[in-house]
Amino acid sequence: MKNKLLIIGAGGHGKVIADIAIQMGAWSDIAFLDDNDSVKAYMGIEVIGQSNDATSYINDYDIFVGIGNNQTRQKLQEKLEAQGASIPILVHPSAVIGNEVEISQGTVVMAGVVINCSTRIGRGCIINTSATVDHDNVIEDFVHLSPGTHLAGTVQVGVGSWLGIGSAVSNNVTIASGCIIGAGAVVIKDIHEAGTYVGVPARRI
């Protein structure tokens, strides 16, 4: 871990990442990379280049991909990993993390989140504001659990899936990779195929 942090992406998600980093107090300096040339600073944090410049900062900065889109985040993080970048884990001080919880690099755990015991969170995930993840869950790489998402015990979510705001998943349910679960949807049985699922109970559309 280095004493400076570089966040790729200064949009809404990136700004929340920066706010969490500030509250963690783990870095003496924080900067953004963003492809919008017209903005030089966000939240008083300087934009020092574009996303393609990340390689030149690898030796001096921890680098975190602050992009909400799962596929874009995966592409950027995997490129950084291949180049040997130091990619941290960000956890808001108000989050509650149980025993034997594993969280992998590039994942952010936001304010008000509860992750209960014996759960594994993969690389590059977003566990968004006030989401709850109960015991013995497996959240695979580059998943986004939106604000207010609730997962019961022994749930598995496949790579790159996105669970919309306020969605809920019953216990012992598996969701395939590449799924979109709509806002407020309730998943009560296994989902085996990628697709978009909405409603109560959730059905594919």
Image (spheres, helix red, strand yellow):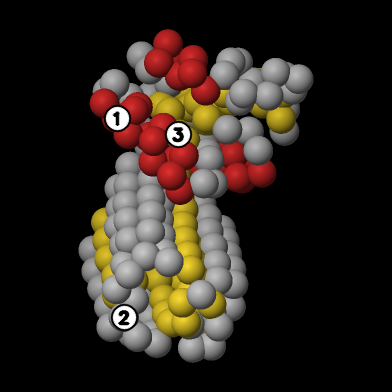
At 47% from the left edge and 82% from the top edge, which residue is drawn?
203
Can you give x and y, in whole percent of width and height, for residue 94 in the image?
A: 53, 59
- Seen as rendered, the residue at the extreme right is 38
* Residue type at numbered disc 1: Glu
For disc 1, the neighbor class at 10 Å (few under 14, some 14 to 19, many from 20) is few
On the image, which quarter does residue 64 sit in? top left
At 71% from the left edge and 30% from the top edge, which residue is drawn?
42
**Tag 3 residue:** 64
* Residue type at numbered disc 3: Phe
Using the image as rendered, state which of residue 167 and residue 91 is in the foreground.
167
**Nearer the observer, disc 3 or disc 1?**
1
* Residue type at numbered disc 2: Asp
Quick check: 192 above or below 126?
below
Q: Tell me which numbered mark, 3 or 2, is placed earlier along the sequence.
A: 3
| The label number, if any, that marks residue 190 in the structure image | 2
Q: Is residue 167 visible?
A: no
**Nearer the observer, disc 3 or disc 2?**
2
**Tag 1 residue:** 81
Using the image as rendered, state which of residue 46 and residue 93 is in the foreground.
46
Quick check: 164 above or below 59?
below
At 31% from the left edge and 80% from the top edge, which residue is drawn?
190
